[in-house]
Amino acid sequence: MMSELFGEFLGTLILILLGNGVVAGVVLPKTKSNSAGWIVITMGWGIAVAVAVFVSGKL
């Protein structure tokens, strides 16, 4: 039971950190990826989902 809860927590943590990091990089004005566009945000969230599933899928 604790392994499943830890996996859910870890997957959610990675998903939110990576996904919000991509959005912050595109939206904030003093970053190198400012105004990169929606395609960067969608690809970033897609990669964040894949990494979160890969990390927490085996727990």
Image (spheres, rainbow, N blue to C red):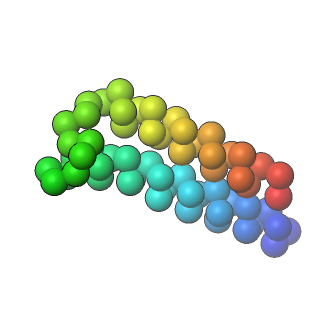
Q: Within the image, what quadrant is residue 47 found in?
A: top right
Tell whether 14 sits left or right of 23: right
Which residue corresponds to the image point at 77% horizontal and 49% vertical from the top-left?
Answer: 57
Which residue corresponds to the image point at 47% horizontal and 52% vertical from the top-left?
Answer: 18
- x and y, in percent, of residue 2 in the image: 81, 72
Please tell me whether residue 14 is drawn above or below residue 41 in the rendered image.
below
Please tell me whether residue 36 is drawn above or below residue 24 in the rendered image.
above
Residue farthest top in this picture: 39
Tell whether 33 sits left or right of 10: left
Tell whether 6 sits left or right of 43: right
Residue farthest left in this picture: 29
Which residue corresponds to the image point at 71% horizontal and 53% vertical from the top-left?
Answer: 55
Residue farthest bottom in this picture: 2
Quarter of the figure with the C terminus = bottom right
Which residue corresponds to the image point at 39% horizontal and 53% vertical from the top-left?
Answer: 20
Number of residue marks: 0
Residue farthest front in this picture: 32
Quarter of the figure with the N terminus = bottom right
- x and y, in percent, of residue 43 in the image: 45, 32
Tell whether 30 sits left or right of 10: left
Out of 57 and 22, give the one closest to the viewer. Answer: 22
- x and y, in percent, of residue 30 in the image: 16, 54
Please tell me whether residue 46 is drawn above or below residue 7 in the rendered image.
above
- x and y, in percent, of residue 15 in the image: 54, 52
Out of 47 and 32, give the one closest to the viewer. Answer: 32
